[in-house]
Image: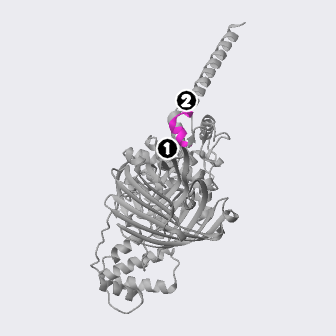
Amino acid sequence: MSNYLKAVLLVSLTLFVQTSRGSGLFENKLSQISENIYWKRLLHFNGEESYADSKSFFLSENGKTSLRDELLANIEAFKKVQAKYTPQKIPAQCAFPERFQFIKENFPELDFKSPECPHFKRWKSAVSGKSLSLIFASSFVNNPSSMFGHTFLKFNKKDGDQLSLDMFNYVVAYSAKAEDSPGFLYALKGLFGGYTGIVDVQPFYQTLREYSKVESRDIWEYMLGLKSKQLDSLVNHIWELYANANFDYYFFDENCTSVLARILALVTNFPLDEEMVGYALPTDFLRILKKYKLVEKNLYYPSLRKQFFAHYDKLNDSQKENFKLILDNHDIEGDTKTYQALVHYLDYIRHDHENKVSKEFQIKQKKIYTLASKFTNQEQMSYSKPIPPDEGHLPARLDLLQARENNKEATILTYRPSFHSLSDPAGGYEPWSQIELFKLSLKYNYDMKELLLNEFLIADIQSLPDFKFLDTNTSWSLDLRVAPLYEEAKLNAYKGSFNLNMGFTKHTHNFLFSFLTGARVEGHESFKNKVKVGPNIKVNLGLNILRTRFILESSYFYSFLKNHQRERDYLQSRLELSHSVSKNWDIKMMGIYFTQVGELSKESYKSYSIGLAHFF
């Protein structure tokens, strides 16, 4: 073999070895970087697959389940400029700017193309700001998707604490893309799947109109301490989601809060996403942000309803009379405070009707605005700041009670995963409201020496807004549960019941009275036709004195269907006393009473219990 051939062979062998070694090093690096926590969070990976469900979010066919394949596909896409991504048909570098930045930093030896991305840059310039806030819209029981509150992010162009200067900042929200109006079907789909979740970006004034004005919710703003580099990465990633991604939406886990937690976990490097796995409540997220010292301060903005009543309640009797007369188009003089109250009232009513008001209303509003503008010495209203939602009690509760029922001893253990009851401490929650879901109660009866189901409450929701003649809000309650046949003194036979009521409520901070009426349906094999159905009347009384709450719930049910040759009607009452000994502990006392109405002197069931409740 000639020396020339030997030299060629040696060079070829050397190049082959180096190429193989380089290929092996690249493969090892690819596997290593694909397991990087930042890459996993960029893809919203959860164990074996990504939460994202849209094909456009992945550049590899296996991207939803393979971190490595998706990384390799992104690397290959970033080596070229192909205008085929997102509906705008832009290059991969422009569709996935934060992925591009991550890959460039981790693979500096590779040659990547860097197109201009004018479409993305215009969007980024409009959306980004100097700082970031998390906005919490308080719970709104009348909307099933917002029972626990709603969260979204807001970019702040300027620093400040005036909402009026904030309107054209942009907010980022994750919500269900639904054409259904809020209602039972809407809630059902949200619980069990059926909606697509999308990341939406829009001006703050549009979001505020929906939450604070139309739905009469308080707004809380939590200013977050993020650095400029973190904000830049955040905007990049939000674009990736906004332009390319959708998710399955569920009210309890894949909701507005869980997705925002994953977004913030990416740029803060705190395990916010891991803390919010599973049952994710917006108020839990607020506490987690404070736990990791990401919150610098919070600001409170009352709803339009609260703004109006703050002005109206300051009027004296004469001013209130003038308020009504002017509202009824009487030509009389009013003062500054009266016209301020009128302006806020008409603004609230207009937004409460989503701007769908009559021509007469518009003329009246314009006239009152004109008259109000003549008063230059308008008083600046200060609103009392309630306890922030993150400082309220934790949503889960465990009760341990020692009971005496029908003169028999029993121990009762109750677990409630969520959320708030009338007897719980009110701070941080909507006053005199109740949302309890999937509460399971077991008891050990010492006489029977058995562990029995005491009750399984699927849902007990009570919306009890204060009824005012200027704002005639309707109260309602819904109750779905499995419970013993107390009215027949049967502790180990169970009926299913569904109860829906409507009525009115009067309440102050310390006192509650509500009167509700509706229908009840109950089912058990011993009933005629297996079912009882009829009208139901329910009365609530409540007292809130310092750290102690008294709640009396009494209801009367009359069945149209007979059983055992007599009408089925009964009265049930529950008296509950709760006293807070610390933020997470209550002492509870409870009395329950059932009787046939025709036999009031002879109760079919009564129990008294005392014990502890722990919030966690």
Membership of 35 in magenta stretch:
yes
Q: Residues within 10 Å of mark 1 (few under 14, many from 20)?
A: many
Q: Residues within 10 Å of mark 2 (few under 14, many from 20)?
A: few
Membership of 416 in magenta stretch:
no
Left or right placement of residue 568 versus residue 133 in this view: right
Q: Amino acid at mark 1?
A: Asp
The x, y position of residue 258, in whole percent, is 51, 49
Left or right placement of residue 77 versus residue 168 in this view: right
Looking at the rendered structure, the secondary structure element under dot 2 is helix
Residue 125 visible in the shown view: no
Boundaries of the magenta span = 32-43
Residue holding disc 1: 273
Left or right placement of residue 301 versus residue 66 in this view: left
| Residue extending furthest toward the bottom | 331
Q: Amino acid at mark 2?
A: Gln
| Residue extending furthest toward the right | 1
Q: Considering only vertical position in the picture, is 593 above or below 399?
A: below
State the mark number for residue 136: none
- Quarter of the image that includes the N terminus: top right
Q: Considering only vertical position in the picture, is 63 above or below 387?
A: above
| Residue extending furthest toward the top | 1
Answer with the quarter of the image where residue 134 lies: bottom left
Residue holding disc 2: 32
> Which residue is rendered at x = 52% and y = 37% of the image?
104
The x, y position of residue 410, in whole percent, is 48, 48
> Which residue is rendered at x = 40% and y = 64% of the image?
431
What whole-number distance in Å separates the C-alpha atoms at marks 2 and 1? 22 Å
Mark 2 / mark 1, whichever is N-terminal: 2
> Which residue is rendered at x = 70% and y = 11% of the image?
5
Q: Considering only vertical position in the picture, is 377 above or below 411?
A: below
